[in-house]
Image: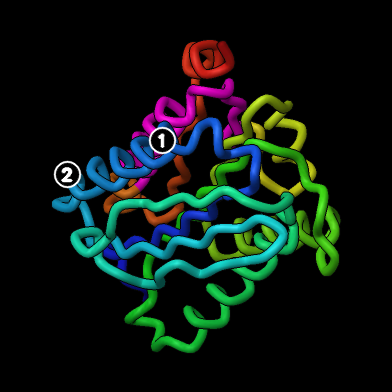
């Protein structure tokens, strides 16, 4: 049996050149996200992995306690290879978790993806392959995927990569902090819910949240 009191949060963050205009907002939003998860520490232990991507993939840190998460230093550059980044993160995470004894594996795995642009640079993974991979991890292992997309139809993009409409949200440029806050609340709620129901999934984004974030 996996550990019901342990959550592993994987955060995949776009650092392509277009993120420059919302760099400070994104950094502040990420700090608030981590702070909220730390306040929920009584619910369960949480470990964090952060990866950033442009046309390359960069694992910033892996499997560290919330208390050790450093301030985010976003350095925008390059283009947007979202599919390749998702494929790398998910397959590497899956392999590392599978290598652990079952009793040491987290009972809750969350993958939060935040981007402000459309896929334009992947070479190894396709939409269909990522969709299949995400659906497999969701259905077989109850991983929770959250997708935040700026200035796009995030629900449609999310569907194309296997993320349910309930857990994908569009945010307007300049609303990165608010998007992270809404997502952080879903993650904190999920951690609490999993303590009593291992099959629970995160609450959906409400229509009022969607309306506010899209403005």
Q: Quadrant of residue 81?
A: bottom right
Identify the residue at the far left of this view: 42
Q: Residue placed at 24% from the left, 59% from the top? A: 66
Residue underneath mark 2:
39
Residue underneath mark 1:
24
Q: Is residue 178 above or below residue 110?
A: above
Q: CA distance from mark 1 to mark 2?
A: 23 Å
Specify the segment rendered in magenta: 166-190
In the image shown, does 19 or 34 lie closer to the viewer?
19
Label 2: how many residues lie within 10 Å, few (<14), some (14-19) or many (20+)? Answer: few
In the image shown, does 158 or 121 lie closer to the viewer?
121
Element at label 1: helix
In the image shown, does 73 or 191 lie closer to the viewer?
73
Q: Position of residue 133 (x, y in %)?
A: 72, 63
Q: Position of residue 119 (x, y in %)?
A: 78, 47
Q: Residue placed at 32% from the left, 49% from the top? A: 191
Is residue 138 visible in the rendered image? The answer is yes
Instruction: Please say which color scheme the image uses.
Output: rainbow
Q: Residue placed at 41% from the left, 25% from the top? A: 178
Q: Is residue 118 above or below residue 48?
A: above
Is residue 144 visible in the rendered image? The answer is no
């Amino acid at each position: 049996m996996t550990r019901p009191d342990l959550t592993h949060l994987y955060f995949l963050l776009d650092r392509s050149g277009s993120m420059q205009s919302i760099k400070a907002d994104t950094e502040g939003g990420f700090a608030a996200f981590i702070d909220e998860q730390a306040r929920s520490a009584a619910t369960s232990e949480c470990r964090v992995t952060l990866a950033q991507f442009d046309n390359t993939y960069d694992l910033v840190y892996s499997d560290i306690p919330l208390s050790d998460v450093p301030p985010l230093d976003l350095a925008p550059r390059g283009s947007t290879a979202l599919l390749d980044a998702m494929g790398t993160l998910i397959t590497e995470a899956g392999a590392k978790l599978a290598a652990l004894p079952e009793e040491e594996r987290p009972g809750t795995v969350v993958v939060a993806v935040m981007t402000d642009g459309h896929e334009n640079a992947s070479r190894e993974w396709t939409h269909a392959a990522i969709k299949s991979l995400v659906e497999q991890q969701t259905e077989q292992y109850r991983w929770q995927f959250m997708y935040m997309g700026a200035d796009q139809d995030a629900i449609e993009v999310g569907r194309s990569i296997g993320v349910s409409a309930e857990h994908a949200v569009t945010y307007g440029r300049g609303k990165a902090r608010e998007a992270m806050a809404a997502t952080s609340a879903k993650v904190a709620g999920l951690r609490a819910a999993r303590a009593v129901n291992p099959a629970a999934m995160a609450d959906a984004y409400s229509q009022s949240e969607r309306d506010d974030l899209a403005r």
